[in-house]
Amino acid sequence: MNTRRVLAAAVTITFATGLPARQPHVAAATHALSDTLREPPLLRNRSRVPGVVEFDLTAAPAKLRLIPGGPLVNVYAYNGSVPGPTIDVREGDSVVIHFHNELPETSTVHWHGLHLPADMDGSVLEPIPPGTTYDYAFRLARGSAGTYWYHPHPDVRSTYQVAMGLFGAFIVRAADDPLAAQRIPEKLLILSDNRFGADGQVEFPDPRSITAEIDLENGREGNVLFVNGQVAPTIPIAHGALQRWRIVNASAARVYRLALPGRPLIKVGTDGGLFEHPVEVPDVILANSGRVELLVRGDSSTVLQDLPYDRYMPQTRPPDWDSTRTLLYVRGGRVTGASAVRPLSMPAVLRPIPTLDTTLVAARRVIVMSQGQLDGKRMDMHRIDIRARLNTTEIWTIQNVVGMDHPFHLHGFQAQVLDRGGVPEPFPSWNDTVNIPKHSSVRIVVRFDDYPGRWMYHCHILDHEDEGMMGVLELSN
Amino acid sequence: MKSRYAMPALALVAAVGLVAARAGTRDPNHRAVQAGATLADTIMHGRYLVISHDCGGCHGGGSDPAAQGWLAGEMTPDMQFLIGPCYLTPGAKPCFHTHPRNLTPDNETGLGRFTERQIFNALRYGLRPEDTPDVEITSMTPGAGNYPLHPRYLAVPMPWMAWRHMPDEDLWAIAAYLKRGVRPVHNLVPESEGPPDFWAGAYTVDKIGVYPAQAFPTKNEQAP
């Protein structure tokens, strides 16, 4: 008998594990039952002035049928739709968005990934009380073309408001986009998930329940997976034709590992837009709030899969974490339209991405992510955690010291990854959200070229953000 | 199978250790922490406590600080624990695998990024350092005095419920030794499994008693 055996025997105890029952994964059972993918409505520009776009965006309670044949569900919706309408604008545009908060609670609109003045960022520091209007106004810089999204970022209530339906895509286009010049058709795919109770309504656990504890740990995941608010819809692509997919992960916590079985994915961009060159990858791990752009060529029919990815703590890992899910049916077929099978004349470089200069770095910082905390602290809105100067470059080491992944999001700036776990990043790209896998470090370099004020940085698992796994960066001259 | 202390013996070692700490000793490796102790004194005291409390028995290196893998955590599968009925009956459920973690000050895989106060709170209250803010805890009521509303406890069978009875200066000395007296070893230990309540159900007062312990003498004890 040794210490180890005695210690283990001493705790051969009987306990109710409280592990959640395996929830059925809801999807269209077959391709035949699946609807064609629809895109969210475009938000209408009411400005007639060239270079100025002006929108009205209203967040309000609504009743929508979220699942075909299901009941009407009480939701929060932007302009009455879930996902909210897509904002589609161009580099150089001056954007004005009149946000009307008709919710029964305080909200904000965070323009996730956009480089804009701090008081236009829609963070917890700029709450919009119920019944009021706030005008978000900012100008989209040259080089900012990419796929972004918008969602509420109020104090403590982000998980709830996003789960209730508040999220939408924000696309910035470049005049010289080489893929647009090739007239490659585009599809927007907004990934989200949700959980419904026996009454069909959006379900949240009793705060004292073990489910609430598990949500706090993992982030709230749902068992119904949506693409643009549809369950496993279909995209038709003619054989040989190309499509550009802009994919947004708007889930509160779910990380997707996207794959087309048997085919490589052609990845052409991330959060902040196109790469210099396309890359072929077997699959893409898309952390919540991240975006990716893919080129997909039509072939025989297939499915877009979500492969198992273990981001979890073993104590709260869902029982069905290792199942493969079907997100989308891809219907192949013969050439039908004029857009199909044209030889591509791709430019040598999709767009130049200047590598940020790491030789003149004003500060190197380490940010430690643990459960619900950054650097051992919870957020305090009145505390400045990092003071930095404008027109400087900094290198941040984001260090995850715990056994689950945490996606790190810096507001207002696109950063370049230097290395992940010591492995140099093979090419530069722009990112506002970087997944930090369990027990590993990622170094990013960021240039603070403009916009003084206070900025958030945080874990983008929304439950962790609400819990205060967030810090405040102050930029000043 | 290597011979190691049994649990009751471990408690005895702890008691003897404390007596020795009070009385002073000729062991040149051990210098008690006293008023005006230097950092070196504190670290040496922590070292003595770590060796004598058999931390290495689970966390690597046994009782020999010169041994390979000293406090570096699980290196081989035989160092893990099976917790639950599967310990006696293979395949029985629930079954949790728990893993002695890396106690060296490596930044990513060890205790490097935790403060000495977080290590102190782990030993005194059983709280996982990564889940517990770096603050002084002044209460044991969840939600009060910085005690977390949802406490996350160290995995079974870490015997913190016995070691929490050590005086403050001993726990601080252990934290100082682990953070400053040990070379970092990069060894990623798998996260321990457990029930979703993070063992709260295993650490109730009726199972582990109260802290501080009931006044002497209890019904099992007698005054000399």
Image (cartoon, coloured by chain):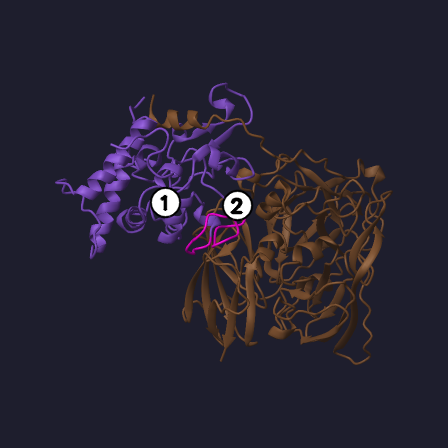
Mark 1 to mark 2: distance in Å?
A: 18 Å
Please give the chain letter of the residue carrying mark 2. Answer: A
* The C terminus of chain B: image quadrant: top left
Query: Looking at the picture, does residue A398 appear above or below residue A447?
Result: above
For mark 2, give the secondary structure. loop
* Labelled disc at residue B219: none
Question: Which label sits in the foreground, 1 or 2?
Answer: 2
**Residue B115, image x and y in percent?**
38, 54
* Labelled disc at residue B186: 1
Note whether residue B102 is visible: yes
A375 sits left or right of A294 in the view = left
Q: Which chain is brown?
A: A
Please give the chain letter of the residue carrying mark 1. Answer: B
What's the residue at 22%, 39% (across, down)? B19
**Residue A453, image x and y in percent?**
55, 75
A301 sits left or right of B109 in the view = right
A306 sits left or right of B175 in the view = right
Dot 2 corresponds to which residue?
Answer: A404
**Residue B119, image x and y in percent?**
38, 48
Q: Colour of chain B?
A: purple
